[in-house]
C-alpha cells in the first residue's frame, strides 16, 4: 500500500494476529488473569478499608497501590479480550492516545507510590519513635494525592508531545496495546527532537524516584545491620522484603521497556516484556504484599466473620 498522503484515523494492534488459531486459549488465559487480578487487588483494598487494625500508613499506601493495579490492568486487557473475540485489532486515533495517557499515568503513579512506600519504611525502621508524628494522616494523604497528580501530569506531558507528531504512513502497531515506543516508530517525521524531551520528562521521574528509593534502602540496610539481635534484624527486614520485591519487579520491567533504544527490530522483544509487565505486575502485587502477611490474612478472616476492632493507627 502507498502510504503517501495517507492520514491515520485509526490504528491496528497486530500483537495478537499471530495467535488467531489459539485465540480461545488466549482468551480464557487472559480473562482468568484479569479476573484474579481485579478481584485480588479490590479485595486487598476493601480489607484495608474495613479493618481498623490496617489503618496504618503502610497499608494506606498499599490500598492505593491495589486500586492502581486494578485500574492498570483494566486499561489493556479488556481491549485485548475484545480483539481476540472479534479478530479485529482496530482502535481509533483518540482511543489509542487515551490508552497511552492512562497507561503511562498508571506507570508514573506507581513510581511515586513505591517511592512514598520506601520513605514510609525508612521512617518506620530508622526513626521508629517519631514514626506516627512524621507519617501522620495529613502527610500520608499529601504523599498519595501528590503521587496520583504527578503521575498523571507526567503522562499528560509525554502524551501531548506524542500527539504533536504526524502519523501519515503505516497505522499497524506491532504491539498488544498502544504505548509510546511503538508509536514513535510509526511517526512519519524525524522524531529525534521529540525523543529527548519525552524521555527527559519520563527519565527525570524514573531517576529521581529510583535514587530516592535506593538511598532510603541504603539507610534502612545500615540501620538493620546495627541491630544487635538476629530476631530484631529478621523482624525489621521482614517489613521491607515485600516492598523491595515489588520495587525490583516494577523497576526491572519498566526500565527495560523505556530505557532501551526504540527500533523496529526490537519490537517483538518489547511487546513480550510489555505483556509480562502489564499482566504479571498487577497480578503479583497482591501475592507479594498479602500472601505471607499475617495481618492481612487475619483481617480477611475477621472481615469474613463480621468482626471488627476499634483501634487507632499504629506503626507496622
Image (spheres, rainbow, N blue to C red):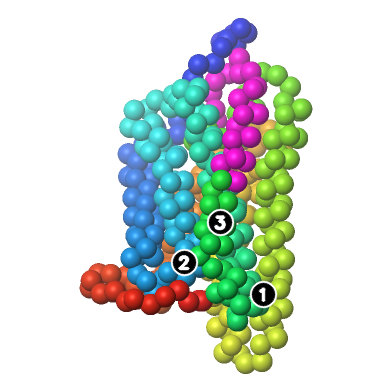
Q: Is residue 310 above or below residue 26?
A: below
Left or right of 142 on screen, residue 63? left
Distance from disc 3 to disc 2, alpha carbons, whole Å, reads: 15 Å
Q: How far across and down, in percent of the image, does residue 172 sit?
A: 54, 23
Which label number is shown at residue 142? 3
The residue stretch that appears in magenta:
150-174
Which label number is shown at residue 59? 2
Label pair 3/2, CB-CB below 8 angstroms: no
Left or right of 1 on screen, residue 289? left
Q: How many other residues sit within 10 Å of disc 3, few (<14), some (14-19) or many (≥20)?
A: few
Tell me, yes or no, whether the highlighted magenta stretch contains residue 53: no
Q: How far across and down, in percent of the image, does residue 206 sit?
A: 67, 50
Q: How far across and down, in percent of the image, does residue 269 sit?
A: 60, 41
What's the residue at 34%, 76% (across, down)? 310
Left or right of 217 on screen, residue 107? left
* Residue sticking out furthest to the left: 305
Among numbered discs 3 and 1, the one appearing first in the sequence: 3
Give the position of the N terminus as an image quadrant: top right
> Does dot 1 land on a helix, a strand or a loop?
helix
Amino acid at each position: 500500500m502507498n502510504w503517501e498522503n495517507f492520514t491515520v484515523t485509526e490504528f491496528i494492534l497486530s500483537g495478537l494476529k499471530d495467535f488467531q488459531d489459539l485465540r480461545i486459549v488466549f482468551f480464557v488465559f487472559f480473562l482468568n488473569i484479569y479476573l484474579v487480578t481485579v478481584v485480588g487487588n479490590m479485595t486487598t483494598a476493601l480489607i484495608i478499608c474495613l479493618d481498623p487494625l490496617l489503618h496504618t500508613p503502610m497499608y494506606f499506601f498499599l490500598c492505593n497501590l491495589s486500586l492502581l493495579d486494578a485500574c492498570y490492568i483494566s486499561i489493556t486487557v479488556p481491549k485485548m479480550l475484545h480483539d481476540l473475540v472479534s479478530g479485529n485489532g482496530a482502535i481509533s486515533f483518540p482511543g489509542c492516545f487515551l490508552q497511552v495517557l492512562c497507561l503511562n499515568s498508571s506507570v508514573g503513579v506507581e513510581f511515586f507510590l513505591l517511592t512514598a512506600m520506601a520513605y514510609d519504611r525508612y521512617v518506620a525502621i530508622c526513626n521508629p519513635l517519631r514514626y506516627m508524628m512524621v507519617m501522620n494522616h495529613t502527610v500520608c494523604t499529601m504523599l498519595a494525592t501528590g503521587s496520583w497528580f504527578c503521575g498523571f501530569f507526567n503522562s499528560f506531558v509525554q502524551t501531548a508531545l506524542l500527539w504533536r507528531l504526524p502519523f501519515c504512513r503505516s497505522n499497524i502497531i506491532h504491539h498488544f496495546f498502544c504505548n509510546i515506543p511503538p508509536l514513535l516508530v510509526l511517526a512519519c517525521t524525524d522524531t529525534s527532537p521529540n525523543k529527548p524531551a519525552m524521555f527527559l520528562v519520563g527519565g527525570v521521574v524514573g531517576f529521581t524516584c529510583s535514587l530516592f528509593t535506593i538511598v532510603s534502602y541504603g539507610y534502612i540496610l545500615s540501620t538493620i545491620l546495627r541491630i544487635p539481635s538476629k530476631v530484631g534484624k529478621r523482624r525489621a527486614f521482614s517489613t521491607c522484603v515485600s516492598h523491595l520485591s515489588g520495587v525490583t519487579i516494577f523497576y526491572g520491567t519498566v526500565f527495560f521497556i523505556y530505557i532501551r533504544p526504540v527500533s523496529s527490530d526490537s519490537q517483538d522483544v518489547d511487546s513480550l516484556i510489555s505483556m509480562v509487565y502489564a499482566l504479571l505486575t498487577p497480578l503479583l502485587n497482591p501475592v507479594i504484599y498479602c500472601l505471607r502477611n499475617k495481618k492481612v490474612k487475619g483481617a480477611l478472616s475477621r472481615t469474613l466473620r463480621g468482626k471488627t476492632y476499634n483501634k487507632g493507627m499504629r506503626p507496622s
